[in-house]
Image: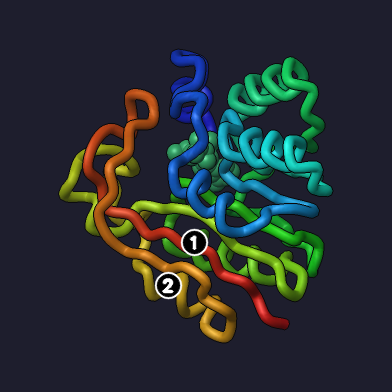
């Protein structure tokens, strides 16, 4: 599967555009995203670069780590980070077999990270484990309903999400924002038009 992603990223520079996902932009206006931040399945890094730039402009403390299994995407991200003077720790991690640290991050970001059902559960549980008390899990994913919209995301419905699978893992935490429904997205050539998403900003309580 990483081969599939490498081929896509090799064909098109900025596969999902250069702008951060709109929900990430909106939530960053409401929540101060600072401290040690992990972005998973972050590809060419449009979201983490945006958050790092926001932190730089507002003088927040911020350090960023990125996990993805596409070497090509990580190479593109490395060049962009160097060009903008942003320091990122880039890690080649296959999330089907990731080892999650305990209580390390203030924020974990996941934008359109889609995996098989077993990996979804492992990733959600790993994210919760890796967050500090008071840390935030923030992101946007396609819901199972997206299969009918045909405006982006996996063609295999297994890779899409049920909202309750997320809520099940974070049931004892503070749900600051949880939205399931339609949005309009224009993100490169692959995410185009009306789509069906799950958005979340959840603060963990440990
Ligand atoms: C739809 S792209 C989203 C990229 C980025 N978050 C964004 O919004 O622009 C999905 C990303 O997940 C990565 N990915 C998919 N499965 C993965 C896995 N098992 N381990 C690590 N990365 C994975 C792909 O390489 C790709 O970069």
Question: What's the residue at 58%, 50% (across, down)?
Answer: 28
**Residue 51 visible:** yes
Which x, y percent locates residue 104? 81, 62
Q: Quadrant of the C terminus?
A: bottom right
Secondary structure under the numbered disc 1 in the rendered image = helix
Q: Residues within 10 Å of mark 1 (few under 14, many from 20)?
A: many
Question: What's the residue at 71%, 38% (across, down)?
Answer: 52
**Mark count:** 2
- Residue 21 is tagged as none
Residue matched to label 1: 120
Question: What's the residue at 73%, 65% (across, down)?
Answer: 130
Question: Looking at the image, is mark 2 or mark 1 earlier in the sequence?
Answer: 1
Give left or right: position of 19 versus 66: left
**Residue lying furthest front in this view?**
58
Residue at mark 1: C-beta within 8 A of ligand 1 = no
Distance between the Cα atoms at labels 2 and 1?
Answer: 9 Å
Question: What's the residue at 16%, 49% (across, down)?
Answer: 148
Q: Quadrant of residue 191?
A: top left
Viewer-closest of 22 and 162: 22
**Residue 113 visible:** no
Mark 1 and mark 2 in contact (Cβ < 8 Å)?
Answer: yes
Residue matched to label 2: 165
Q: Quadrant of residue 90?
A: top right
Which x, y percent locates residue 7? 47, 20
Relative height, residue 63 to residue 5 (above, below): below
């Amino acid at each position: 599967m990483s081969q599939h992603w490498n081929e896509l990223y090799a064909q098109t520079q900025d596969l999902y555009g250069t702008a951060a996902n709109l929900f990430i932009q909106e939530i960053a206006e409401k929540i101060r995203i600072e401290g040690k931040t992990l972005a998973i399945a972050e590809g060419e890094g449009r979201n983490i670069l945006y958050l790092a730039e926001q932190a730089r402009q507002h003088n927040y403390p911020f350090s960023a780590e990125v996990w993805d299994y596409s070497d090509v995407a990580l190479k593109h991200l490395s060049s962009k980070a160097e060009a903008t003077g942003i320091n990122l720790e880039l890690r080649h991690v296959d999330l089907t077999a990731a080892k999650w640290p305990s209580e390390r991050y203030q924020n974990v970001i996941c934008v359109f990270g889609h995996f098989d059902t077993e990996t979804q559960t492992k990733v959600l549980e790993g994210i919760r484990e890796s967050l500090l008390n008071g840390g935030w899990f923030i992101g946007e994913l396609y819901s199972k309903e997206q299969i009918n919209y045909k405006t982006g995301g996996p063609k295999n419905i297994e890779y899409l999400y049920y909202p309750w699978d997320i809520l099940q893992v974070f049931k004892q935490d503070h749900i600051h924002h949880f939205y399931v429904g339609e949005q309009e997205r224009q993100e490169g050539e692959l995410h185009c038009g009306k789509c069906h998403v799950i958005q979340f900003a959840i603060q963990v309580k440990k």
